[in-house]
Image: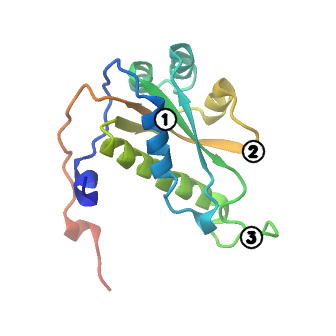
Amino acid sequence: METIKCIETRRSIRKFKAEQVPHEVMQEIVSAASFAPSWKNTQVTRYVVVENAQIKAKIADEATLGFEHNNGIIKGCAALVVVSLVHGRSGFERDGSYTTSKEDRWEVFDAGLATQTFCLAAHEKGVGAVILGIFDEAKVAEIIGIEEGQKVAALVAVGYADEEPSAPKRKSVEELVKFV
């Protein structure tokens, strides 16, 4: 698929078929996402693929901060990808000082780049995805037993699409860009 076409045709998928995504396909998606840029090539993003229905339900019931819409998405997806990051690497110099005024917020930027790259790679492989942002990071980390030194950055529900949403309205280029 051409890059621009991939970007323009990817949609947030919230309804999924029951079919599981093969591990090989998920590994290919993560492999592609590993090429996302990161602060000084720190490559801090990690992925935990939750396929177990009981664990997905526990996250949906206990960690969505009462946002009911996400409960159904999490319970209905083939897998919930917990995107995490290795804390304390992006934005830092070797002596531990911050490089810029963004301080450690570079790590979230890096995880965001990797997450979007993950979603584009998933689309290329015929796998639907939606990034979920309303959740209790600490509770998700507890439920999945995240590795020490990592922080949860995003949740991505994935699976084969059981819907074909149309493109949402986009702002005009004139609204988005300014040349000086």
Q: How far separated are the C-alphas under marks 2 and 1?
A: 22 Å
Which residue is at 24% across, 57% downward?
Answer: 2
* Circle 3 residue: 93
Name the outermost residue toward the bottom: 180
- Residue 101, above or below 71: below
* Circle 1 residue: 134
Residue type at mark 2: give it: Gly
Residue type at mark 3: give it: Glu
Q: Secondary structure at mark 3?
A: loop
Q: Earlier in the sequence, mark 3 or mark 1?
A: 3
Which residue is at 64% across, 27% downward?
Answer: 144
Which residue is at 42% across, 52% downward?
Answer: 117
Which residue is at 68% across, 49% downward?
Answer: 86
Label 2 with label 1: CB-CB less than 8 Å? no
72 or 54: which is nearer to us? 54
Q: Which quarter of the rendering shows the C terminus? A: bottom left
* Circle 2 residue: 149
Give the label, 3 or 1, closer to the camera: 3
Q: Earlier in the sequence, mark 2 or mark 1?
A: 1
- Residue 167, above or below 67: below
Disc 1 crowd, CA 10 A, few/some/many (<14, 14-19, 20+): some
